[in-house]
Image (cartoon, rainbow, N blue to C red):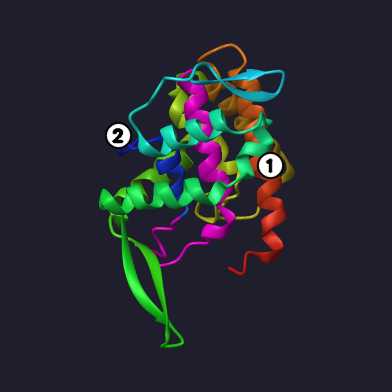
Amino acid sequence: MPDGSLSLPARLCLLAWDPARPGTTDTARYHHLVRAGALTELAQRGLLIDDEGIATPVDLDSRTGDAVLDGLLELVRESMPHRWRTWVRLHARVTFDAVREQLVAEGYLRAEKRRVLGVFPSVEYVLARVAAARALHEETRYVLQGPVPAGEVSERDAAVAALAAAAELRALEPRAPESAEAGARRGSRMAELTGRGGAAAPGLRRIMDEVRGAVGAETARAVPSAGG
């Protein structure tokens, strides 16, 4: 997948911007998606494990070298134990904002100062590297469409595609209405990608199932108030 240096949550955050509309995104709906990506990456790295449904750090000292991932890991360590689904939404905006600032620092997004009603200061984030975002969207759609067997997709790419699909990102939705058969194939493909994304270690498939389910639930809850 393009821009392999980007973390899993950074890829998901970048996918929230539609290259066809580089100045617009519905960020309020995607806080939980970016948090889910961070949880998944920490689990794939073996730094968070599943303990009877609880997201559990393996130790008190491990670090990833990524400020966002390490910040979330520290938050989990210092907080009361919570289930994966709770962590998908709990203080999720903190993770989203931090990842967005990383993308600004790396030149993928640009922060533009505006004034609402000509008075109130505001910041709007727009795509700066449209080509990179478009390539990421195209590759994610390619993974979702299934020309490559799920077992041959990298674990990270599989996790990105499965989580992005669960969040119903507009730019990745089918361009035409799906038949029941096509919808069933799409659902089967998402299940395969979820399994592939959770293939790295015992228990990771369960984590991916939990996190993807939470993303879908939070997306459904956010839709009525999304406001476009």
Tell me which segment is drawn in magenta. 17-46
Residue 36 falls within the magenta-colored stretch: yes
Q: Amino acid at mark 2?
A: Ser
Query: Which of labels 2 and 1 is toward the front?
Result: 2
Within 10 Å of disc 2 (Cα), the crowding (few <14, some 14-19, many 20+) is: few
Secondary element under disc 1, as helix, strand or loop, is helix
- In the image, is residue 165 above or below residue 227? above
Residue 68 drawn at (x, y percent): 41, 39
User: In this rendering, does residue 178 appear at all?
Assistant: no
The residue at the point 48 percent across, 62 percent down is 25
Judged from this view, the residue extending furthest toward the front is 78
- In the image, is residue 203 above or below residue 160? above
- Image quarter of residue 21: bottom left
The residue at the point 54 percent across, 28 percent down is 77
Residue 183 is tagged as 1
- Image quarter of residue 114: bottom left
- In the image, is residue 9 above or below residue 207? below
Side of 224 where 117 appears, left or right = left
